Structures are given as structure tokens and as C-alpha cells.
Image: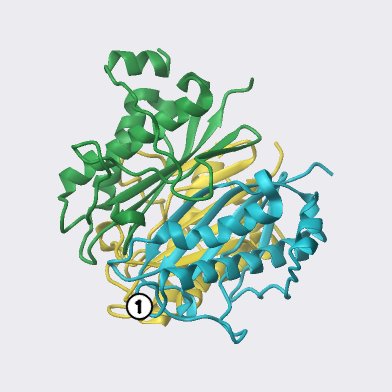
Chain colours: A yellow, B green, C cyan
Amino acid sequence: MSAEQRMMELGMALPAPASPAGRYVSATQAGNLLFTSGRAPRAMDGGPAKGKLGREYTTAEGYALARSACIDLLALLRHELGTLNRIARFVEVHGAIASTPEFEAHAEVLDGASDLLFEVFGPAGMHVRSVIGVTSLRQGVPLTVRATVELKPD
Amino acid sequence: MSAEQRMMELGMALPAPASPAGRYVSATQAGNLLFTSGRAPRAMDGGPAKGKLGREYTTAEGYALARSACIDLLALLRHELGTLNRIARFVEVHGAIASTPEFEAHAEVLDGASDLLFEVFGPAGMHVRSVIGVTSLRQGVPLTVRATVELKPD
Amino acid sequence: MSAEQRMMELGMALPAPASPAGRYVSATQAGNLLFTSGRAPRAMDGGPAKGKLGREYTTAEGYALARSACIDLLALLRHELGTLNRIARFVEVHGAIASTPEFEAHAEVLDGASDLLFEVFGPAGMHVRSVIGVTSLRQGVPLTVRATVELKPD
């Protein structure tokens, strides 16, 4: 089953991707690799989420935030490529989580993004990953997720 | 107009790039991609800058610091390549900003690097970007910027 | 002398690499580039290390921890590739160090990884590097190291 078919089966609609917050673009391509900028989650009311893990957000809420940021990542990829079916596989996913010094559940939070990629892409969604706890992020967003994907040959 | 011509028109001279601070190199190449190490800004007196955004430095000062780090990035690229004209395009730019937990203007700071790349390279300077607020950086520098660029075929 | 011969000469045995801590894989390949997930050090008793640089760990201890994380990186690479001799060169190494806001010896700590790569691979172990001081890392580990390596043609 293709990624787009899995999206339909999951009943998952993609919103318009967020626009760049500065003098940069959301995606670049070099050879058959596509690189993305960092994607932030949306709050339940549709606006930008704001706060830190371990203070404003629990780990379970962080999982949902990482999934939300990953939905914006998929929205961006479909916008850039026309269809998610052009993706051969995910290569790298990097997460940055605004968190307190005591926070330790970074992996559990980022699983919200990784699990979604597996649901939609299956084994082709499996990626290497890094996740760090950062002091602060732009506009106070609680986390960002970025990815490198390999495209199918034209 | 070529990148080197734009540099001349901007009246921009490049200093010698900073040397590695440990057992590593400043640039590596794989295929037609060139990767750089993190570049730090210089203080007004020419020495290394030191301090955190949101405490020792304002956002406007941070913008100037990001521009300064990007000048060191360009100095490194010219040193490695002989001429900036060998660059086909910028692919990725990653910024790390030493900042207080309350700092939120990461994007406005990193624009100091992104704007410079656009001034010199035009659309070929447009890149994907990530920017994070970190606890601390080597030797207390306020920010670092690193990049991946695609080279023109030989 | 090959990397595997140098390992023998150094009397260095590699343990089994650590398993992924979430829904991801430890290595992915795109073209002749191999990407790894972040690798953590082990404590002296063989379990995971825990704490921050500038508080629980000194810079000298951090150097040993970075070397330990790099040993897990080499273990992973041999596990994935069958032999370290398939590595043409190291391209990128990225370090994240859980540290206090006052910590400044990031470069000295990450040299623990870079020095090991030079011991085993010689000039082919030279890489570009970034290192940041982060608020916290998964499960409280003091640092992580990840790499991109270029493989020899088949």
C-alpha cells in the first residue's frame, strides 16, 4: 500500500504547511536527498504551541506535540513533492525539545513523530534519530522536528 | 552576477578563517556536498565574542553576531574552494544560540546569517534552516553557524 | 594499515552496540553515505552513564565519556558493515553535551571521540564537527555522539 493510500486509510488530512519564519526555505534538494527546515507543532486551538516539556507539558502531551510537528512535516513534503509516494525512505529525523534540566523522556516524546512515520510509510519510514533537550526555541515553541528523506528516482 | 562579484560590490573583505578548536577539520566533501564545522562570531575588537542572548546580548546584537559567524563561514568556504563561485547552492544552515530559557528571538538572530547569504548568493543562497537555543557553547561563544553546500560539477 | 588492523594493535574490543531507545533504527544508508543515531557512553560499571558536565562530571571525565560513546559508534558501524574497513572516511561528527550554563570545555570533551577516530582511521578519521551544550538528554545521559561516514564503493 502506498503512503498516500495509508494516509486515506488513517483518515488523515494535511493542513497547509507553516511558512518559513525568516530568510530561508522549507525544503532543499541535493541529488535525491530532500532536506527540511525545523517543523513546530500546533496547539489544540490551531495556533502555535508554547511552553517547555517538564513544566507546561507532560510527556504524553509532548508525544502529541511531536506527532503534530510531524503532520506539518508531512504537509510540507506533500506540498514540495506533489505526493508522498515520491519518498523512497526516511533517512534522518532530528528533534529538539525545549525542556527543563531535569527532563529525561526525550525518546518517549519524539516517538510521537517516529510512530506516525511508521504508520504512514511502514519500514520506509524507519530513520536514524537524534533528540536533544534545549534551553529555548523560536517563539517559545516546545519542540521542532526536521528530516532528510531519500526520493525515488524520477 | 557571480558571488565573488557581489562580494566586491558589497565591499566585503574576508579575514582568514578560524582554525579548528580540536582534532577535526573545518570542511569535508562527499560527492558534490561540502560540510562545514560550526563557525563562531568575532567580537568588535576582533577577538572571540562571549556571552548569551537574552543576557549579555540583545537580539539586534545577535543579528550582527550571526552575520559575523557567517562571514567566517564564507572565509572558510573561499579558503577551501579557492573561490565562492564554485558553490552551486546552499543546502542546509544550522544555528545554535547560547541563550536564556526565556529567549524567543532565535529566528531574528539567525536571519543575520541568512540575509548575508542572500545578499551574496541570491536565490542560490536560500537554504533550509534549524535554530536551537542551547545552554552553553565552547569557550562561551554566543552562537555557532554551520552549513552544507552543493558544489558545481567540476 | 587498515582500521581493523589498528583496532587489533590498540587491543580494542568492541561490545555489542546499544539498541534503539524508540521507533527508529541505528543506521541508514543513502547512496554511499551512512548516517547513525546518537550514541551514548557507558558508565564504568557497564550501565548507562548519567549526569551533566560541569556538575557530576569533570572535563577529563567527559573526555572519557566521549571516547566511550565513540566506542559504541564504532561497535554500531562494524555491526552494520561487517568490518570497519568498508569506511572510506568520516564526514561529520555531532556532539551534544548535557551541561551547566557555565560550562565552556565542549571542545576538550568531544576530543575524546575525535582522538579515537584519528587513532583508528588516521587521516580518514578527520571530520567536521559541531558540539553544543544542551539542557538535558534522554534518560539523563551526559552526552551523545552521532556521525555521517562515507563508504568505499562496493
For the residue pair C96 and C29, the one nearer the viewer reads as: C96
Q: Is residue A8 visible?
A: no
Disc 1 crowd, CA 10 A, few/some/many (<14, 14-19, 20+): few
Work out whether C120 lies above or below C76: above
Q: Looking at the picture, how far across and down is residue B102, in whole percent?
A: 20, 65
Q: Looking at the picture, how far across and down is residue C54, in whole percent?
A: 35, 73
Q: Residue at x 41, y 40 (%)?
A: A25
Tell me: B38 left or right of A140.
right
Please state which amino acid type lies under the numbered disc 1.
Arg
Tell me: C3 left or right of B53.
right
Q: Looking at the picture, how far across and down is residue C84, in whole percent?
A: 77, 56
Q: Quadrant of the C terminus of chain A?
A: top right
Q: Looking at the picture, how far across and down is residue B122, in whole percent?
A: 38, 24
For the residue pair B115 and B75, the one nearer the viewer reads as: B75
For the residue pair A139 and A79, the one nearer the viewer reads as: A139
Quarter of the rendering containing residue A29: top right
> What is the chain identity of the residue bearing mark 1?
C
Work out whether B41 lies above or below A7: above
Tell me: B115 left or right of C122.
left
Instruction: Return the residue at label 1.
Output: C55
Q: Which residue is drawn at 52% across and 80% down?
A: C49
Q: What element carries label 1?
A: loop
Q: Can residue B120 be seen in this view?
A: yes
The total number of labels drawn is 1
Q: In which quarter of the image is the N terminus of chain A?
A: bottom right
